[in-house]
């Protein structure tokens, strides 16, 4: 098999006397072809006709699906990193899948992997703390998309074009919004590891029983929530991020976008709003506006059809009752879909539809893009950078992304992975996301990656929480948030 080029031999020591054996890319390609042929033969033998999945043409899908993504190929030379590879990530389902597959990745890159995971706020704190050190404690760090601008300006992240050929990433394979969100000042500061839009999850069976159409506008959403809200039976219309601070702050920015109002005075363009020149720092905040007042009133209306503990619900708390069948609709990131898609006992399993955010009067249906990129700390010692780049390419490769999906992840930043037939069979969410991307509904301008974004999210999450509790009026919430936001503006570094 080695003579036939089916087995690769990789030295484990400097002398080469000790080595390990791995399947070659040629063997993996042959195996992939075999499995595809077996699938086609079985389909022809037992069904006699092509299925809708194999015959449909979807934005090049019939061509792309023929290119099944092969498994990860072991690096020809193991990475030389003293103490192993050190990775800092967010404690979400996708990165936990990576942790569960640690042994497989260690075999691929040839060194140990040490991964630390934090909640979103603690991850930001640890990343900033790490940047103040003389030498980084991590080789690779996960970065929430809105943090890119601030981390770029404060020299937290290393521009990728300084340490690698960007063409190796295959930028055209990434969902456009996710790839654009990795940039600041025209330079990429990381590779998308997750593209996880926030969607509206809705129970197709409950909608059918009530004779309701999937909502496309905020008014239709309120009507559906009202029709399906039955607290006496323990069923509520909708769940969303309404916990004070970071959670509600994200909701506020996305709801403003649903009503056609960006948080900044951005210039409109064909896809929504132009974010290419944010690094010039010539922007102003636009919170206290008529469209924002409509958005605030909409959030107050949502309270009427939400669970009684909605004001303490954040990312996971809104999905768990949806998965348990107590909620008819929920705003949620795709990365949380495994909570019901992989739970055989969930009433929402195989009964969930996926929609972009319903639009307000002056807005359009969009799916605000969330997720994480993986980047290299600017203070990483030079002798570790080359190996960190190679590991980064492995973690974000199509083969790795496919592996995450096969092991439970429902995030995917690459078109090629979403078009893989074995991936599409796992969940309808991938076809839905690809369709939204082609229709230009995936947008990252609702949470622009400016240096002040964390403070703005916190401010909105505090002022709007007081509004939802009835302490202040919507007008006062907007006015106070605007004043506090304006005070955060600083001149460019």
Image: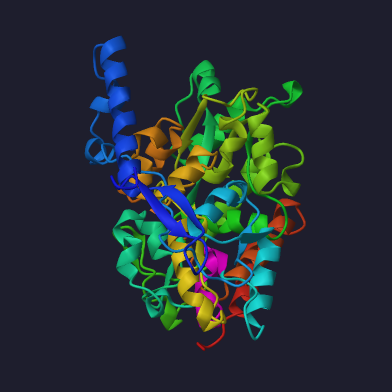
Q: How many marks?
A: 0
Residue in the foreground of this view, choosing between 281 and 153: 153
Q: Is residue 484 left or right of residue 106?
A: right
Q: How is the image coloured?
A: rainbow
Residue 205 vertical position relative to residue 424 in the rendered view, above or below: above
Tell me which segment is drawn in magenta.
140-157
Q: Residue furthest front?
A: 17
- Does the stretch in magenta take in 205? no
Where residue 219 appears, x then y in whole percent?
50, 39
Residue 447 visible within the image: no
- Image coordinates of residue 13 in percent, x first then y, are 52, 65
Tell which of 284 and 394 is nearer to you: 394
**Residue 281: image location, x then y, percent:** 46, 81
Q: Residue at x 48, y 66 (%)?
A: 448
Q: Residue at x 38, y 45 (%)?
A: 417
Name which quarter of the figure residue 339 lies in.
top right
**Residue 452 at what x, y percent from top left?**
58, 75
User: Quick check: is 141 in the magenta stretch?
Assistant: yes
Observer-nearest of 211 and 435: 435
Q: Residue at x 31, y 17 (%)?
A: 42
Q: Is residue 99 left or right of residue 44?
A: right
Residue 186 location, quadrant: bottom left
The answer to whether residue 8 of the structure is visible from this angle is: yes
Q: Residue at x 74, y 48 (%)?
A: 311
Question: Picture quarter containing residue 464?
Answer: bottom right
Quadrant of the image containing the N terminus: top left
């Amino acid at each position: 098999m080695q003579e036939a080029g089916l087995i690769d031999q990789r030295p484990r020591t400097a002398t080469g006397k000790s080595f390990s054996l791995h399947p070659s890319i040629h063997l993996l390609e042959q195996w992939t072809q075999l499995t595809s042929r077996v699938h086609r033969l079985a389909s022809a033998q037992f069904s006699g006709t092509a299925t809708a999945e194999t015959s449909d043409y979807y934005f090049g899908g019939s061509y792309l699906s023929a290119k099944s993504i092969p498994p990860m190929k072991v690096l020809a030379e193991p990475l030389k990193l003293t103490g192993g590879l050190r990775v800092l990530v967010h404690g979400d389902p996708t990165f936990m899948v990576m942790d569960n597959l640690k042994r497989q990745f260690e075999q691929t890159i040839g060194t140990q992997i040490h991964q630390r995971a934090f909640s979103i706020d603690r991850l930001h704190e640890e990343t900033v703390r790490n940047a103040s050190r003389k030498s980084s404690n991590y080789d690779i760090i996960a970065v929430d998309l809105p943090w890119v601008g601030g981390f770029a300006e404060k020299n937290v992240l290393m521009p990728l074009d300084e340490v690698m050929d960007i063409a190796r990433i295959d930028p055209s394979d990434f969902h456009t919004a996710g790839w654009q969100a990795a940039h600041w000042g025209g330079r990429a500061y990381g590779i998308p590891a997750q593209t996880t839009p926030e969607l509206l999850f809705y129970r197709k069976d409950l909608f059918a029983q009530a004779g309701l159409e999937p909502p496309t506008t905020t008014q239709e959403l309120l009507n559906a929530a009202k029709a399906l809200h039955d607290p006496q039976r323990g069923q509520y219309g909708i769940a969303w991020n309404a916990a004070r601070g970071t959670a509600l702050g994200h909701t506020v920015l996305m709801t403003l976008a649903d009503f056609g109002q960006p948080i900044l005075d951005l210039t409109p363009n064909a896809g929504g709003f132009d974010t290419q020149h944010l690094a010039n720092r010539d922007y102003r905040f636009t919170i206290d506006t008529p469209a924002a007042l409509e958005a605030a009133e909409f959030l107050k209306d949502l309270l009427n059809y939400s669970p009684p503990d909605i004001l303490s619900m954040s990312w996971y708390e809104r999905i768990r009752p949806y998965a348990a069948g107590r909620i008819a609709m929920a705003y949620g990131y795709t990365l949380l879909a495994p909570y019901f898609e992989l739970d055989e006992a969930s009433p929402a399993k195989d009964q969930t539809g996926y929609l972009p955010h319903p639009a307000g009067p002056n807005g359009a249906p969009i799916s605000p893009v969330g997720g994480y990129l993986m980047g290299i700390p600017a203070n990483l010692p030079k002798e570790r950078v080359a190996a960190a780049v190679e590991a980064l390419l492995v973690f974000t490769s199509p083969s790795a992304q496919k592996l995450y999906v096969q092991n439970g992840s429902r995030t995917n930043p690459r078109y090629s992975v979403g078009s893989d037939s074995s991936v599409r069979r796992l969940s309808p969410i991938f076809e839905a996301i690809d369709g939204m991307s082609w229709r230009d509904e995936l947008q990252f301008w609702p949470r622009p990656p400016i240096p002040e974004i964390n403070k703005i999210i916190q401010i909105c999450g505090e002022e709007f929480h007081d509004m939802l509790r009835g302490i202040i009026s919507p007008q006062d919430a907007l006015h106070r948030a605007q004043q506090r936001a304006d005070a955060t503006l600083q001149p460019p570094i």
